[in-house]
Image (tube, rainbow, N blue to C red):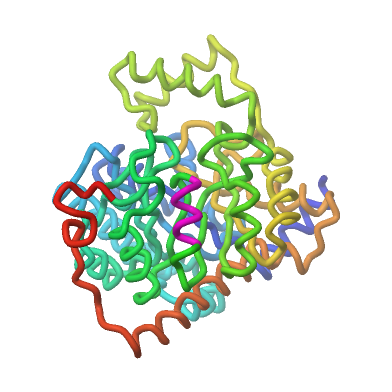
Amino acid sequence: MSDSLARARELLAAHPVADGHNDLPWALREQVRYDLDARDVGTDQSAVLHTDIPRLRAGGVGAQFWSVYVRTDLAGDAAVSACLEQIDAVRQLTDRYPDDLAPARTADDMEAARARGRIASLTGAEGGHSIANSLGTLRGLYRLGVRYLTLTHNDNTDWADSATDEPRHGGLTRFGEQVVREMNRLGMLVDLSHVAATTMRDALRVSTAPVIFSHSSSRAVCDHPRNVPDDVLAQLPANGGLAMATFVPKFILPAAVDWTHAADANMRAGGLHPLDTTPRAMAVQRAFEEAHPRPRATAATVADHLDHMREVAGIDHVGIGGDYDGTAFLPDGLGSVAGYPRLVAELLDRRWSDADLAKLTWKNAVRTLRAAEDVARDLGARTRPSNATLASLDGPAGDG
């Protein structure tokens, strides 16, 4: 592994990681209400965060889609405001650390940041509730730099079914289809992590631009609804899209699924949200883990998913979306953003070629965003913005 680790670091120096999903902005909100003096990510924050600039550098990260996430217990204007605050938090980070983080909105911006030795900083909005059923709000987020929208989070929206909620629409409603078309027209990537398989299939049917899964792994390897079924993975070559494997143990290790249900119930019993990663919440999680040792995922667990995803979708359609600072637990050896070389080393040991690894880490993400930009350029020349509403397409109740 030591030789492979050295080779992995050399490869990442030339083809850094373009990671699809990191929840640092929400962690900053929850822990210190965006006080960047209290959480100076220019210095080691390993006691409280998975992410800081020294560890991004050590991990060979060259581009990051920062999640501008909003919990689903916020809705309407409150969700929009929280999303705007997250976007502002990313702007504060890039303003504060200009020698390390470069604002990016396009594939060319990603390449330019890498050429300057900066980490390209893009944003993706996690959860369609963040647009409050408004295509105008969707366009506003795009103008502020948001380059993907995850159609749902853990709960259904009024126009799309989530993977972890009771089916309500059977996939996308008519308004949901219009959201996808408007995203294509803008050049905003359609992110299908968190959505139901029916929503995945509907979005692939409707979208004329590549879709992404910003942080999802293989359902065939770990049968969790947050993961991507093989029939969907098999559609990515025709679509041009990208599935970015996540590191979250409960999504990648079958033995971790039941354990996580128990840990989540323990959090709720303590009056805490299961996704809370504040120091107080993490203390509760660690106490539960000490009493009930959890199954341990490793870099090999993630590599098993990537092997299968490459086999089904092809090497041009796989990437990485770790979900750092959005989960309480991580695989051994991948405990922070400094861990990417260990995953690359594991793949090298599995005889992945340098060319294939360059696609996994960097090239596929850049190509996918550029392809979405090309589609938007064409659609923008031929179509006007849609002013459709949920009621006009789905009826007053928004039933789909």
Residue at the far bottom in the pictured view: 381
Q: How many marks?
A: 0
- Report x, y in % for residue 320: 59, 54
The correct choice, above or below, for 342 with respect to 133 in the image is above
**Residue pictured at 74% horizontal, 40% vertical:** 300
Q: Is residue 38 left or right of residue 310?
A: left
Q: Is residue 230 left or right of residue 20?
A: right
Q: Main secondary structure of the magenta part?
A: helix
Part of the protein shown in magenta: 197-204
Q: Is residue 399 left or right of residue 226?
A: left
Q: Residue 140 magenta-drawn?
A: no
Viewer-proximal residue among 246 and 234: 234
**Depth order, front residue of 107/166:** 166
- The x, y position of residue 213, in whole percent, is 52, 55
Looking at this rendering, what residue extends furthest in the top direction? 291
Q: Position of residue 255 (x, y in %)?
A: 64, 24
**Quarter of the image that includes the N terminus:** top right
Where on the picture, by quarter, is residue 319? bottom right
Q: Name the residue located 46 percent from the left edge and 36 percent from the top edge.
A: 327
Horizontal and vertical percent position of residue 87: 28, 59
Q: Quadrant of residue 382?
A: bottom left
In this rendered view, identify the residue nearer to me: 195 or 198: 198
In the rendered image, residue 200 lying in the magenta stretch gets the answer yes
Taking the spot 81% from the left edge, 52% from the top edge, the residue there is 4
Q: From what the image shows, is residue 288 above or below residue 169?
A: above
Taking the spot 42% from the left edge, 54% from the top edge, the residue there is: 42
